[in-house]
Amino acid sequence: MLNEFFKDQLWLGVAQAAVTVVLAVAVTLVGRWWKIHLEKEVGIALVRGIVQIVIVALVLVVLLKGPELVAVPVLIGMIITASVIAGRRVKGIAGSIWVSFYGIGFGAGLVILLMVLVGVIDAALTSVIPVGSMLIANSMNTCAQALERFASDLRSHTGQVEAGLALGAAPDECVKPYTQSAVHSSLIPRIDQLSSLGIVWIPGLMSGMLVAGADPVYAAVYQFAVITMMFASSGLTSVVSVLLVQRRVFSPAQQLLLRPGNSVPSVKKGRAA
Amino acid sequence: MVILETVHLGREVDTKKLVNDISIQVERGETLSIVGPSGAGKSSFLRLLNRLDEPTTGTLLLNGTDYKTISPRDLRRRIGMVLQAPYLFPGTVADNLRFGPLQQGKELEDTRLRHLLTQVGLDGYADRDISRLSGGEAQRVSLARTLANSPEVLLLDEPTSALDRTAEGEVEKLLGEIIAAEGLTCLIITHNPAQALRLSKRSMLLEAGQLVKIGPVEEIVHA
Ligand SMILES: Nc1ncnc2c1ncn2[C@@H]1O[C@H](COP(=O)(O)OP(=O)(O)OP(=O)(O)O)[C@@H](O)[C@H]1O
Ligand SMILES: [Mg+2]
């Protein structure tokens, strides 16, 4: 329908984006009606999202013509940004951004590097940047989810954790149930992604390859490989982030820092739970 | 003989003095009750003694040794603590009792496990899942779990206040018997004056983080 009104591709895009924004605003207003206040966050995210993706597209057009090594700073830049976004999600833990940086850097970084070396990911910029960004984005979500789950589990189980400490247990031992469930729960979406592949979800990458005339079986198998890499990089990220963060919730004298009323002040402000 | 001594012990959070410069001595084998209005800092004081919180002033001497020179894990085994709520770990009663010794790489012997259960009046409960315990039973398991570590000093933060009248009486009676039988040194927070009179000979009164008075229990609480 829209393409009848907008013959120019650019204006068509603007119209398409505008319609989706109206939809997002509607959803936000429904939330507001239930006193779930997302307006500010959604507003900022929408503006950031459109500005970023347009700038990136313009930059990529230029970059993709450059030498292959350009991928290194681009991917590192993405990892840093992803760490800041994931780290900010968890309130009340000092240095959570560093935790996500090591987690995402190790998980996504290692998988990208290995896979390029082995030849699973083509070193060409047109391949390593989109595939790499998918791995980083997935690691970012997994990291945020794992940290958030760990922090909230800990806050609701301070009694159990301190009961363990009071019995002379090591901090790692006291938080073991929560580190385990944080890693496990953060990976469930990645596993679902694998098992729903092709049935509920046909990723854009494969559709693109098919349109470009690739062998359908190869397109499918390659898509499977990408999703499997996502699982691997997310898994590493989750384990590393959780291992690092469990150190940060205790003081050097093995006292639980993440207690209600005892944590960093930023816990108190913000949205209603 | 003095087993535990606090020296200008205090804790300040955001310029609020939760515990303000408290110096007391506790004799080996004695029970000292801690009383005072809600928010007086009783729990905050007790949490400093096994270093669940870090003091901002002063320190504690355990048998004359500065507790900051003892590893926190060893200290917490030696100064055991029972909280208001039992906070048991998932599993059986026996699992909970074995937890403490296991942290020191030790196995709790079966005879000792049975003895502990007898002491808290829970004969035959070893394999019971903790989800099938009443409030009073759970609190007795929590007590036995702390005793399984063979602590030298026992800290109790209102151990019976979450229980109903009957269970409170039972747990208090068991507690008194165990303290006497084992010759334990014990610091107990209670808001129940009669309980303070029954369990302790000496008492300390806290208000707004300050030590107001310490002395014979009859001079401090009035039932
Ligand atoms: N981590 C903390 N940060 C700031 N204030 C705290 C913290 N912990 C406790 N407080 C405050 O310190 C005061 C003393 O608390 P505490 O729990 O020690 O009192 P209490 O004597 O045990 O009271 P109750 O009889 O109700 O258990 C209270 O005003 C409490 O709100
Ligand atoms: Mg208290």
Image (cartoon, helix red, strand yellow):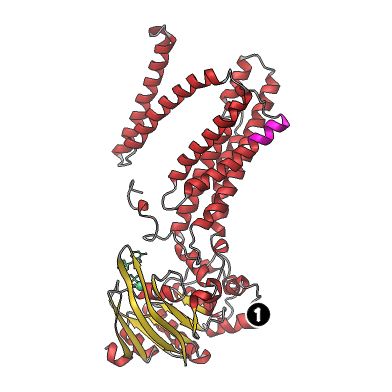
Q: Residues within 10 Å of mark 1 (few under 14, many from 20)?
A: few
- In front of the other: A174 or B169: A174
Identified at 36% across, 37% down, the residue is: A41
* Quadrant into which the N terminus of chain A falls: top left
Query: Where is residue B134 drawn, in percent x and y?
Result: 47, 72
A68 displayed left or right of B157: right
- Is residue A113 part of the magenta span, yes or no? yes
Q: Quarter-wise, where is residue A67 in the image?
A: top right
Query: Where is residue A17 drawn, in percent x and y?
Result: 40, 20
Identified at 70% across, 22% down, the residue is: A217
Extreme residue in the right direction: A118
Q: Mark yes or no: residue A191 visible.
A: no
Where does label 1 land, which residue? B110
* Residue type, numbered disc 1: Asp
Q: Looking at the magenta stretch, what is its main secondary structure? A: helix
Q: Is residue A161 above or below residue A181?
A: below
The chain identifier of the residue carrying mark 1 reads B
* Tally of numbered discs: 1
Q: Is residue A93 above or below residue B12?
A: above
Identified at 46% across, 60% down, the residue is: A157
Mark 1 close to ligand 2, CB under 8 Å = no
- In front of the other: A177 or A236: A236
Query: Where is residue B64 drawn, in percent x and y?
Result: 49, 85
- In front of the other: A76 or B223: A76
Q: Mark yes or no: residue A263 visible.
A: yes
Query: Where is residue A227 drawn, in percent x and y?
Result: 62, 33
Identified at 40% across, 30% down, the residue is: A48
Q: Quarter-wise, where is residue B40 in the image?
A: bottom left
Magenta stretch: give its range: A112-119
Question: Looking at the image, in which quadrant does ligand 2 appear?
Answer: bottom left
- Is residue A177 part of the magenta span, yes or no? no
Q: What secondary structure is marked by label 1?
A: helix
